[in-house]
Amino acid sequence: MLETARYEVARRVRGTAFLSVGISLYAAFIVWYFTVLEGVAVEEVFEELPPAMMEAFGIETLSTIEGFLGAQIYNFVWLLGLGLYFAYAAGGLVANDVESGRMELLLSFPIARSRLLVEKFASLLVPIVVVNAVAGGVIYLLAASIGERLDATHLVLTHVLSVPYFLVCAAIGLTFSVAVDRAAVAERGAVGVVFVLFLVESVVSGAGDYDWIRYVSPTHYYEPTPLLIDGTHDPIDAGILLVAFLGLVLLSQVLFDRRDI
Amino acid sequence: MRGDRGAAPPIETHDLTKEYGSVLANDALSFAVERGEVFGFLGPNGAGKSTTIRMLLGLIRPTSGTATVLGADVHDEPALIDAKRRVGYLPAHLGFDGEVTGADVLEYHASVKGDGRLPELLELFTPPLDRPIREYSTGNERMLGLIQAFMHDPDLVIMDEPTSGLDPLKQEEFNEFVRDERDRGTTVFFSSHVLSEVRRICDRVGIIREGRLVELESVETLLSQGGKRVRVVTADDAYAQLASLDGVVDVRRLSDGVQFIYTGEYNALLAALVEHDVREIDVSEPPLEDVFIHYYGEHEPAYADETDGTDA
């Protein structure tokens, strides 16, 4: 059991370490920058921005550490950066092996296709969990080091609730990966879709008759800034993300099962 | 484990057909591979050999017809998965991850399939296991491929163009290895477009062309049915008369005479030769390449060029 997951995880260790270190360094920079801006009326600078822009940048309040981190780290790195990264990584899961011919050997193994797919996908849980844990801890300590106390429950919630969101992004990648032959196409397709959904959600929210469109975007169901500020969230959102995730994985299973390699 | 599942042949196909749009990659293939034999699956590039192998392993679904591998129907995924525990596969393109080491790959394969014969195989084949695979030469990568195909002591090994990329010396070692495997009772099925290698190690040969099985014979029968290669040097011009004889194929005019494959009656040939001034005559076993021409037709010697063509 789990031989494939173990092998794939081993291959992800280095990338996960680099990602965690990189994000921690960026967090350190942002926390330092917050100390520089203290006393400067940052919010006035952004007051001129249209509401859609504020929404896209996740700007609520920049004068508190929570609001600043929410806008500068969570909205950019978590919602956009990591969302795109996991879509990209999952886009290559199957398509890379099909393109390199490695899939032929894998499918000659005494393993069901569905299990192979699930184990490969499961290897993505390692970066998802490790990056969250490391960055969450580092951000808490960094804030403490400048004398700001982040609410631990809110911080944990912000990270835990990002997991269903990342799972949906990765599942979008997985669907592309099993549907398309070429890895580059699957990866770009997945990144493109997640990015467009992010944009669509920011553009239509709060505006006119078409604001229902935002409900199709996974970004609508994970809003890190209010979570970090006061823990505001709707538990149903995580449920919706998990259902979407399961649906996409199921769809990928069906596509992968039926396809000729 | 060997010899169970009754008398079912290790591989058996019934009207196995695969269509890609309007292209028939495999057209109603029916054949059986017997237990403990080395079966050569011969055909030019693009004849449909890889398509058959992929259907046998469940990588692609037949359009119609069926096949069994170690008694398991290829349509029945659970049964086929069970059978795959006793199947080794060496694909034409291995596609190992470049960044992992040979040892990592073997460890993964061992955890999935088992590695009962690994120590023994590592004495025969010596790829640099602690180096990442991106540093491997083609030969080293093929060796790693062979190790993983045999490491779990399979009853049936399927190989797709196994000797491509091996130098002649390694090829000879490979041939010896395959013969030894057969003597241990392993059934070997391999595809090739290089006829000389098939002649050296195969017990039986199936010839596939444009998706159809053209011939299924033991190598001896193939050679005897293939007739003899006759080379005649005459003082006068015998080309026209000899070329028109029944059973003469693949006629080539040489600078001093004529060469052809003769599958007809010897008496008729001798009667024809009497009418000419024969200086020299040489009757020999034809190379399998020429036998092949007999089945493929002399106007399409597409098999000859190893670099030519694309695989279906």
Image (spheres, coloured by chain):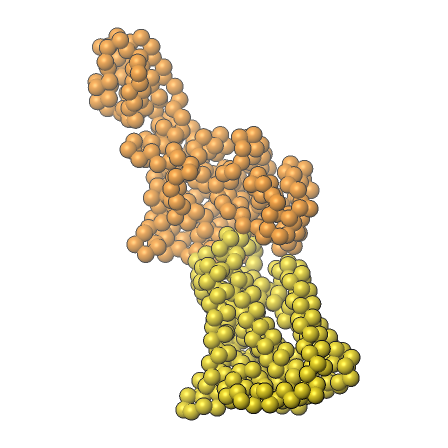
Chain colours: A yellow, B orange
Relative to B85, residue B234 above or below:
above
Q: How many marks?
A: 0
- Residue name at image x 47 percent, y 76 percent: A196
Can you tell which quarter of the image residue B292 is in?
top left
- Residue name at image x 53 percent, y 53 percent: A102
Q: Is residue B106 visible?
A: no
- Residue name at image x 63 percent, y 38 percent: B125
Relative to A156, residue A185 above or below:
above
| Closest to the observer, A26 or B42 | A26
Percent of width and height locating residue B245: 23, 21
| Closest to the observer, A27 or B8 | A27
Percent of width and height locating residue B65: 37, 53
| Closest to the observer, B239 or B137 | B137
Q: Is residue A260 visible?
A: yes
Percent of width and height locating residue B138: 56, 41
Relative to B227, residue A240 above or below:
below
| Closest to the observer, B12 or B308 | B308
Left or right of B30? Residue B186 is right
Left or right of A157? Residue A52 is left
- Residue name at image x 36 percent, y 49 percent: B25
Left or right of B170? Residue B24 is left
Percent of width and height locating residue B109: 62, 52
Can you tell which quarter of the image residue B271 is in?
top left
